[in-house]
Amino acid sequence: MKIMPWAPATPADAVSLATLFQQVEAVTPVGLEQRADEVMARLAALGPQLGPQTRVGRDGDGAVVAYGEVAEMGEVDGVLRIRLANVVHPDAPSDVRAESYDWLLGQAEQVRQARGTAQTAVLGTRCAENDHVVRDLLIRHGFELTRHERDLVLALSEPLPAEVLPPGLVVEPVDERYQELARLAHNEAYADSPSAIQPDQRTWPAHAIAHPRFLPDLSCLVLAEVDEGENPVAGFLFALADDDDENPNVVLHCLGSRVPWRRRGLATAMITRSLRRARSAGFAQVRLQVSDSNPRALALYGKLGFVGSGRGYLVLTRRLGPDDS
């Protein structure tokens, strides 16, 4: 398989990229989007200029067989986070992936320098848990294993616990009224997660209610009675339909509580609410992902009956600073 000259991605590549992502997910799953509308949303979130951030490789027949992406994920404590995606067809030569990583690292360094030479960045990327070749390649490129993201599933055939919230809290639908408050609550809840997305006002809608598979009836916010001027959003749960049109499942896409409201049962109440509604809507299974660095969440999901699906992935990171280029 010979790769033709690389070119930046465009919205017109969404269908071809979705096909490539499907082929990769069938062998080495890392949670890639597999529908054209989802890929379109992914590209749109990168902004109008895709040239410096993406590139597409095609074979001699014009089929997309490789994709590279460098995406800024915001700053936490003065450290810039950059996500790298290196998606290569299973039949492509190994040197294609290696050459692509060289390009990704070079582009990431350009992003870092554009923020100032003193800026430190952390690069993050995914590797399927069964893909030892890619894991070894990343380690040779200076990456270190940071955590294991486990994919868990729950069949909606068992009895569900009752929903219980502490006094002074109420569940509300996710809608336009709470867009900005929910974004701020999300970024606060995930501030200590080195690879979590920190959406700004432009990119937030695609992360939540404007996502093409958003399930409003299964999503919710927990609001607290607080002093005027503070953020009343204590917790949030955004649910999506997965990409299996014949046997759709629910994906608990994003779940969190702000620090002052943790360990009070908000997560259990929100998940239980979503599970009950999912079963009433005819869904048979619910999926979610959780890091092995979050033992409390793992224990909670295990208590609710979630089990491993075997489709987890590894997150690897690498520091990039003035002395590392």
Image (spheres, rainbow, N blue to C red):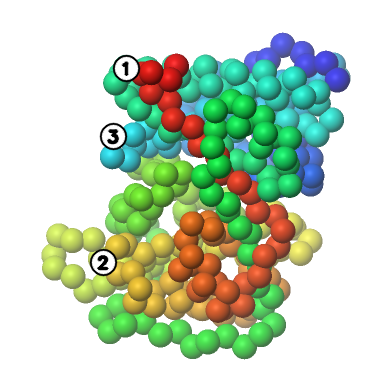
- Marking on residue 78: 3
Cα separation between marks 2 and 1: 36 Å
Q: CA distance from mark 3 to mark 2?
A: 23 Å
Which residue has dot 2 on it? 260
Query: Label 2 neighbourhood size at 10 Å, few (<14), some (14-19), many (20+)?
Result: few
Q: Is residue 216 above or below residue 134?
A: below
The disc labelled 2 sits on which kind of residue?
A: Pro
Does residue 192 appear in this view? Answer: yes
Which image quadrant: the N terminus? top right
- Label 3 and label 1: CA atoms lie apart by 13 Å
Q: Front-most of 226 and 136? A: 136
Which residue is drawn at the image coordinates 36% and 64% (left, top)? Answer: 257
Neighbour tally class for label 3: few under 14, some 14-19, many 20 plus, Cα within 10 Å: few
Q: Are marks 3 and 2 in contact (CB under 8 Å)?
A: no
In this picture, residue 306 sits left or right of residue 204: right
- Left or right, residue 36 beside residue 77: right
Residue at screen point 58% across, 62% down: 288
Q: Could you tell me residue 133's position as x and y percent?
A: 73, 35
Q: Secondary structure at mark 2?
A: helix
Query: Mark 1 Cα within 10 Å, few/some/many (few <14, many 20+)?
Result: few
Question: Up-down: is 80 above or below 156?
Answer: above
Q: In the rendering, at what x and y percent does residue 265 appear? A: 39, 77
Mark 1: secondary structure: loop
Residue drawn at x 36%, y 18% as measured from the top left: 322
For badge 3, the amino acid type reads Gly
Looking at the image, residue 244 sits to the left or right of residue 8; the answer is right
Q: Give the quadrant of residue 140.
A: top right
What residue did someone put label 1 on? 117
Q: Position of residue 213 (x, y in %)?
A: 59, 55
